[in-house]
Image (spheres, grey):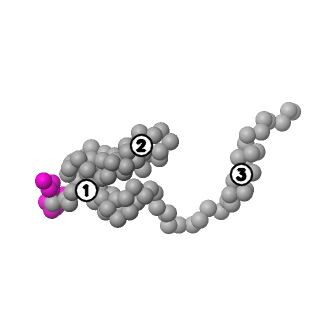
Amino acid sequence: MLREGIHGQPCPPIAVSPAERAELERLQRAPSTPAGLSRRARAVLLMAQGVSGVEIAERIGYTVVQVSRIRRRYADDGVAGLHDRPKSGRPPTVSARKRAQIVALTLRPPAAG
C-alpha cells in the first residue's frame, strides 16, 4: 500500500534488508552515534514501516523536504548515504598534528606556582 508523500504524491515503498535494519537500529540506539545520524536512521526505519513522509516529519522534527532527501540518499547509497557529508566552506586551519599537541597540553596538570 502506498502512502501519500509531499504534495499528495505516493511515496515509493522502501525496502530494508534484515542486515540493514539491524545496522539502522544499532545507529538509532548507540549513545556514541551523532544525533543527526541517529535521527536519519530512525526516519528510514519509519519509512520501512510505511509511515508517510508528512508523519515522519512531524514525529522526528524534520521538514517533508528533509524526509524526502533522506529517502533518496538511502535509496541511492544505503546506510552509508545517511552519514554526514562534507560541508562547504573554509577548511580547518589547525592541522591534525597541531590539534594533538593542543589536546596533550590540556591534559597536563597545571604547573606548580
Between residues 58 and 14, which one lies in front from this camera angle?
14
Q: Residue extending furthest top?
A: 112
Residue bearing mark 3: 100
Judge whether 112 appears above or below 91 on screen: above
Residue bearing mark 1: 14
Marks 2 and 1 sit apart, C-alpha to C-alpha, by 19 Å
Between residues 13 and 66, which one lies in front from this camera angle?
13
Q: Position of residue 40 (x, y in %)?
A: 36, 51
Residue at image location 69% in from the left, 53% down from the top: 99
Q: Amino acid at mark 3?
A: Ala
Look at the image and give the residue range highlighted in magenta.
Answer: 1-9
**Label 2 residue SS:** helix
**Label 3 residue SS:** helix
Is residue 26 on the magenta stretch?
Answer: no
* Disc 3 residue crowd, few under 14, some 14–19, many 20+, Cα 10 Å: few
Residue bearing mark 2: 26
